Amino acid sequence: MQKTILITGSTDGIGKLAAIKLAEQGHGIYLHGRNPDKLAATISEIRSKTQNKTVGGFTADFSDLNSLGQMADQIKERGAGN
């Protein structure tokens, strides 16, 4: 069964490796990052590496509650929480 998975802090390290592995398995992946340019590059890299086009992302700074709220609204709008 394919799932939609949100991975926070996924532009490098363990989060990025987890995103790659899950994308290779065909799951829909949403990445989170603070830096929009780095997030976009990571999404592009994972899509290219895995041929999984259901990789997307959200930018937010978790130390800023307004930013976090905006990310939550974006997730709801995309239907990623269903």
Image (cartoon, grey):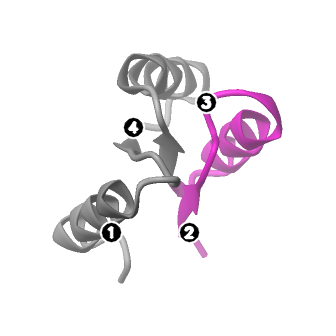
Q: CA distance from mark 2 to mark 4?
A: 14 Å
Q: Mark 1 — residue?
A: 72
Q: Mark 2 — residue?
A: 2
Q: Which mark is residue 53?
A: 4
Residue 54 visible in the displayed image: no
Residue 78 forms part of the magenta stretch: no
Looking at the rendered image, the disc whose residue lies closer to the viewer, 2 or 1, is 1
In terms of secondary structure, where does tag 1 sit? Answer: helix
In terms of secondary structure, where does tag 4 sit? Answer: loop
In terms of secondary structure, where does tag 2 sit? Answer: loop
Q: Residue at x 33, y 54 (%)?
A: 67
Looking at the rendered image, the disc whose residue lies closer to the viewer, 3 or 4, is 3
The single residue placed furthest to the right in the displayed view is 14
Other-residue count near label 1 (Cα within 10 Å), few / some / many at <14 / 14–19 / ≥20? some
Q: Find residue 75 and report its horizontal and vertical position in percent.
A: 30, 66
Q: Which residues are magenta?
A: 1-29
**Mark 2: which amino acid?**
Gln
Task: Please state if 73 lies on the left or on the right of 3 as rendered.
Answer: left
Residue 36 in the image: above or below residue 28: above
N-term-proximal mark, 2 vs 4: 2
**Mark 4: which amino acid?**
Lys
Q: Cβ–Cβ below 8 Å for labels 2 and 3?
A: no
Task: Please state if 20 lies on the left or on the right of 43 as rendered.
Answer: right
Q: Residue at x 60, y 20 (%)?
A: 49
Q: Find residue 10 and report its horizontal and vertical position in percent.
A: 63, 39
The quarter of the picture where the N terminus appears is bottom right
Q: CA distance from mark 3 to mark 4?
A: 17 Å
N-term-proximal mark, 3 vs 1: 3
Q: Residue at x 73, y 42 (%)?
A: 15
